[in-house]
Amino acid sequence: MADPDHNTTPAEALAAIQRSQRDVQRRVAAGSRRYDLSYSAICAMMVGTQVLDMPLNTLGVAVGVILLAVLFRRESDRLGVGITGLSPRRARWVGIGLGLAMLPLMVLAILLNHFATSGVMLALGAAGLMAVAFVFCMIGSRQWRRVYRRETGVGE
């Protein structure tokens, strides 16, 4: 990249910006299995804690949100830019759909808490819901990345 103390032409500056954008897009498209696993585990934990009574279920979601923020920060540091999952346009809908799909799982966990007739039933139900959430988030994260690659034309 050109030294900022020296004059560069607008074309050179634009080319440097475009190279930088492509580098970031390649890093995002490459993804990270560690990110997918961490993201899926955090979401599964948030679903699983909904079988607990108040205030533990709320605390579980709060801890999950904090962990997601830490994960976001770690990925931002790795990539050099913060990716929220809401762009590009089609990838946005994968991200929104993934978030909305967690709601029914959380509601099922809350209902399980109220209607489970035994601790064993509660534990098995929670484990099942957590497994579904984990798998769904893993697939959703990978699907988001596929759509991202398709839209940006990177990593195909």
Image (tube, rainbow, N blue to C red):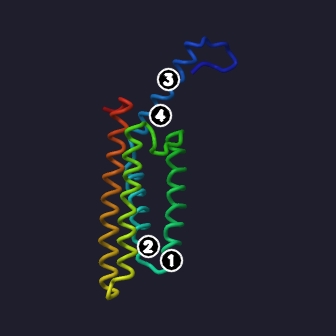
**Crowding near pointer 4: few (<14 within 10 Å), some, many (20+)?**
some
Task: Assign a secondary structure to mark 2.
Answer: helix
**Crowding near pointer 3: few (<14 within 10 Å), some, many (20+)?**
few
Query: Residue at coordinates 40% horizontally, 53% vertically from top-left?
Result: 34
Q: Is residue 61 rendered to the left or right of residue 132?
A: right
* Residue 18: mark in rendering: 3
Query: Residue at coordinates 41% horizontally, 34% vertically from top-left?
Result: 26
Q: Are marks 3 and 4 in contact (CB under 8 Å)?
A: no
**Crowding near pointer 1: few (<14 within 10 Å), some, many (20+)?**
few
Question: Whole-Å distance between the Cαs marked 1 and 3?
Answer: 48 Å
- Quadrant for the N terminus, please: top right
Picture coordinates of residue 65, whole percent (x, y):
52, 61
Q: Is residue 95 rendered to the left or right of residue 11?
A: left
Question: Whole-Å distance between the Cαs marked 1 and 2?
Answer: 7 Å
**Residue identified by numbered label 2:** 49
Q: Amino acid at mark 3?
A: Gln
Q: Are marks 1 and 2 in contact (CB under 8 Å)?
A: yes
